[in-house]
Image (spheres, rainbow, N blue to C red):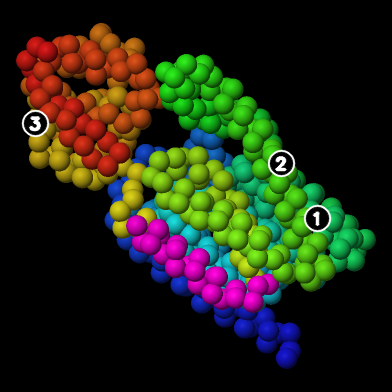
C-alpha cells in the first residue's frame, strides 16, 4: 500500500474521532451557568487587543483572551463563549490518535483517543470558556509534530512544532514544563532511532526559533511567574486555616513548597516513564504484562473518581495539559495483552456513568438561577452585597434588575458597610469564596448584630443571607 494512502486513512480516522469527541463536548454546552473565571475571560476579551496584552495581574499569558476577543463577534452567550474550548478539546482527541499511531500503532492510537474523548475532566474543561483545553491541545500538537520531525526530518514538521510551541507558551505557562520534558527526551529518542546526528542541528535551530518568537514576552515572564506563585498561595490560604484549627500550624508558603517538591518528583517520574516508553518503542516490546496493566487500571479508576469530585477544579485545571499522557500510559499498558479489547471495553464502561453525571449535574456556581431569584425578590430600596467583591461580575452577567450592588471586605466594617446598609429595607449578602476574603466572618457577624436574619437561600456553590431592618 502506498504511503499517501496510509496517511489518507489516518486522517479519516483523525476526523472521525475528532467529530465524535466534538459531539460529546457540545452536549449541554450552554446548560451550566457561567462562573467567575469564565465571566472574567469575557470581560478581558471585551478590551482592545492592546489593553489585553498590557493588562497585568492575570496569571496567564494573553493569547487566549486575544482569540476570544475576535470570537465575540459571534455572540456573548454561554454556548458561543464555550464553543472554542469544545473545538480545541475535540481536536486534541484526534491529535492523541495520531501521536499514538506514530509511536505504538493504530490500536493504541485509537485507544488513546477513545479514553481522552470520554474523560470527564477533559470534557469538563472543554466546556469552559478558559484557556485550559487550548493549552492541552497545543501541547499535544507540539509533541506530535516533534515526533514527526524526529521520525521524518521534514522541515514542515519542525516549522509546525515551532508554531505549536510558541502558541502554547503564549497560552499557558505550563507549556514551559512540557517544553523542558521534550528537550530532555529529545536526545535519547533520537539516539534510539539512530538519527541523533541528523536531527541535532534541526532541533537546535527549531529551539532557537522558539526562543526568538517568545523573546517579546521574556521581559514580563519574571513578574508574571511571581503572580502565578501568588495565585497558587491564594488557594492554600483556607487549607492553612483548616489545618490550624486542628493544631497543625502550616503556612500557605510552606504548603506551596511541599507542592513544588511533589511536582518536581512528578516531573522526574514522568520523564522516567517517557524514557521507558521510548525504549520500549525502540525494542518493540509492547507487553508490559498483566501486573502493570492491573496497576494502571486501578490508578485510572482512582483518578476517574477524583476527577469528578465537584471541589478542587481550580487546581486540577493546572495539570490538564499533562492529563492525556496519563491516559496514554493506561492504554499502552493493555495494548499488548491478548484480551485488550475486553479490558478497553471495561474502561469505557466504567467511565461513561462518570461522564454522564458530569455533563448533566455538575457545575461550579449557579449564577443564572440566583439572578432570576434576585430579580423576583429584591426591591428597589434593597442593597445586594458580595463578601468576595470580584464575584459581582458573575451576577452582572445575568442580572437585569436595578437594585444597587456592591462588594465589601472586612476593612469596610463598620464605616462603609454602615453607609451601604443605612435606610435599606433589606440587605442581601451573597456568600461565596469568603474563606479567602473574609476567613474571620467579619461581615456576616457584623450584619447579624445589626439586623435580623430572616432567611438563607442556597444555590449551587452560592449562599444568600437576607436581613431585614429589625435590629439583630
* Residue 368 vs residue 458, the one in the foreground: 458
> Where does the image place residue 370, in percent across and percent down from the top left?
21, 40
Where is 4 relative to 257, above or below?
A: below
Query: Height in image: 408 above or below 97?
Result: above
Q: Nearer the viewer, mark 3 or mark 1?
A: 1
- In the image as oriented, which residue stretches furthest toward the right? 197
- Measured along the vertical axis of the image, is residue 308 above or below residue 3? above
Q: Are marks 3 and 1 in contact (CB under 8 Å)?
A: no
Q: Nearer the viewer, mark 3 or mark 2?
A: 3
**Residue mark closest to the camera, 1 vs 2:** 1
Identify the secondary structure beneath mark 2: helix
Q: Which residues are magenta?
A: 336-357
- Residue found farthest to the front: 291
Q: Observer-nearest residue: 244 or 370?
A: 244
Please identify the dominant SS of the magenta region. Answer: helix
**165 left or right of 408 in image:** right
* Residue on which disc 3 sits: 379
Instruction: Say the numbered circle drawn on residue 215.
Output: 2
Whether 60 is drawn above or below 435: the answer is below
Answer few, some or many: residues within 10 Å of disc 2's Cα (few below 14, many 20 plus, some between 14 and 19). Answer: few
Q: Does residue 297 appear left or right of residue 214 in this picture?
A: left
Q: Which residue is mark 1?
A: 186
Q: Circle 3 — which element?
A: loop
Amino acid at each position: 500500500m502506498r504511503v499517501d494512502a496510509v496517511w489518507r486513512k489516518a486522517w479519516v480516522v483523525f476526523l472521525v474521532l475528532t467529530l465524535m469527541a466534538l459531539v460529546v463536548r457540545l452536549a449541554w454546552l450552554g446548560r451550566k451557568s457561567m462562573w467567575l473565571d469564565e465571566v472574567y475571560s469575557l470581560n478581558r476579551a471585551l478590551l482592545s487587543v492592546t489593553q489585553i496584552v498590557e493588562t497585568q495581574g492575570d496569571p496567564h499569558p494573553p493569547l487566549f483572551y486575544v482569540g476570544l476577543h475576535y470570537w465575540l463577534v459571534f455572540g456573548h452567550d454561554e454556548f458561543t463563549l464555550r464553543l472554542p474550548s469544545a473545538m480545541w478539546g475535540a481536536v486534541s482527541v484526534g491529535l492523541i490518535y495520531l501521536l499514538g499511531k506514530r509511536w505504538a500503532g493504530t490500536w493504541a492510537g485509537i485507544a488513546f483517543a477513545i479514553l481522552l474523548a470520554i474523560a470527564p475532566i477533559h470534557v469538563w474543561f472543554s466546556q469552559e470558556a478558559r484557556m485550559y483545553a487550548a493549552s492541552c491541545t497545543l501541547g499535544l500538537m507540539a509533541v506530535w509534530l516533534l515526533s514527526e520531525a524526529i521520525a521524518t526530518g521534514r522541515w514542515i514538521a519542525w516549522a509546525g512544532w515551532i508554531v505549536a510551541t510558541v502558541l502554547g507558551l503564549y497560552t499557558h505557562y505550563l507549556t514551559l514544563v512540557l517544553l523542558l520534558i521534550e528537550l530532555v527526551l529529545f536526545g535519547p529518542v533520537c539516539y534510539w532511532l539512530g538519527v541523533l546526528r541528523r536531527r541535532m542541528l534541526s532541533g537546535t535551530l527549531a529551539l532557537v526559533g522558539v526562543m526568538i518568537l517568545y523573546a517579546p514576552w521574556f521581559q514580563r515572564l519574571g513578574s508574571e511567574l511571581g503572580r502565578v506563585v501568588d495565585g497558587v498561595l491564594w488557594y492554600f490560604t483556607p487549607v492553612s486555616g483548616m489545618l490550624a484549627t486542628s493544631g497543625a500550624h502550616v503556612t500557605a508558603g510552606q504548603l506551596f513548597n511541599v507542592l513544588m517538591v511533589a511536582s518536581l518528583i512528578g516531573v522526574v517520574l514522568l520523564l522516567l516513564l517517557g524514557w521507558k516508553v521510548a525504549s520500549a518503542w525502540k525494542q518493540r516490546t509492547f507487553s508490559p504484562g498483566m501486573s502493570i496493566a492491573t496497576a494502571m487500571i486501578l490508578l485510572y479508576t482512582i483518578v476517574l473518581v477524583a476527577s469528578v469530585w465537584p471541589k478542587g477544579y481550580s487546581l486540577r485545571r493546572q495539570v490538564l495539559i499533562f492529563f492525556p499522557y496519563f491516559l496514554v500510559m493506561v492504554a499502552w499498558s493493555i495494548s499488548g495483552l491478548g484480551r485488550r479489547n475486553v479490558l478497553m471495553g471495561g474502561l469505557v464502561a466504567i467511565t461513561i456513568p462518570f461522564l454522564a453525571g458530569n455533563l448533566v449535574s455538575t457545575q461550579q456556581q449557579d449564577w443564572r438561577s440566583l439572578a432570576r431569584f434576585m430579580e423576583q425578590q429584591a426591591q428597589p430600596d434593597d442593597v445586594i452585597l458580595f463578601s468576595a467583591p470580584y464575584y459581582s461580575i458573575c451576577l452582572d452577567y445575568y442580572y437585569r434588575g436595578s437594585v444597587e450592588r456592591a462588594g465589601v471586605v472586612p476593612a469596610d466594617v463598620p464605616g462603609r458597610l454602615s453607609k451601604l446598609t443605612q435606610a435599606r429595607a433589606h440587605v442581601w449578602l451573597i456568600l461565596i469564596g469568603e474563606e479567602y476574603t473574609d476567613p474571620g466572618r467579619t461581615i456576616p457577624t457584623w450584619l447579624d448584630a445589626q439586623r435580623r436574619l430572616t432567611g438563607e437561600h442556597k444555590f449551587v456553590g452560592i449562599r444568600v443571607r437576607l436581613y431585614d431592618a429589625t435590629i439583630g
